[in-house]
Image (cartoon, rainbow, N blue to C red):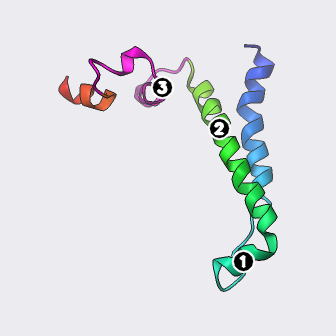
Amino acid sequence: MSILLRRAFITVPPLVLAGVLLMHPNDEGDTIYESVRPVVDNWVLVHIALLLAFPFLVLAAFMLLGGLRGRAATVAESRSSSSPSSTRRGKSWSASARAS
């Protein structure tokens, strides 16, 4: 993967998400309904954008962890990968770690 594409995957999703979150409605009414009713279109747009952006944020975090060594990086990579090394004899990673 080229360095430009890697940098784009790491920087663009958080920036887009920050821009979308600037449109997040504030709690201005007495109830949640009164707060959201006048800006329901923005509210729906923000939450759909969040749903679409989180996988890209996870990808960015995974790319940042690539090549790092250490306990935190190892745990993060082993929890997010579905490689055969993360399971042993049908048990989950945490169950096999406790058995060792």
**Is residue 72 left or right of 55 when viewed as pictured?**
left
Quadrant of the rendering where the C terminus is positioned: top left
Residue located beneath label 3 in the image: 77
Q: Secondary structure at mark 1?
A: helix
Q: Amino acid at mark 1?
A: Ser
Query: What residue do we see at 76% from left, 17% from top?
Result: 3
Magenta-tinted stretch:
67-91
Q: Decide which of 27, 4 is in the foreground and name it.
A: 27
Q: Decide which of 89, 54 is in the foreground and name it.
A: 89
Q: Position of residue 98 (x, y in %)?
A: 22, 30
Quadrant of the rendering where the N terminus is positioned: top right
User: Does the magenta portion include 77?
Assistant: yes
* Quadrant housing residue 37: bottom right
Q: In terms of sequence position, does the residue under pointer 2 or pointer 3 come before the other?
A: 2
Q: Secondary structure at mark 2?
A: helix
Residue 72 position (above or below residue 28) = above
Residue located beneath label 1 in the image: 35
**Is residue 4 left or right of 94 when viewed as pictured?**
right
Residue located beneath label 2 in the image: 57
Q: Position of residue 60 (x, y in %)?
A: 65, 31
Which disc, if any, is residue 89?
none
Residue 37 position (above or below residue 65) = below
Query: What residue do we see at 63% from left, 36% from top?
Result: 55
Q: Secondary structure at mark 3?
A: helix
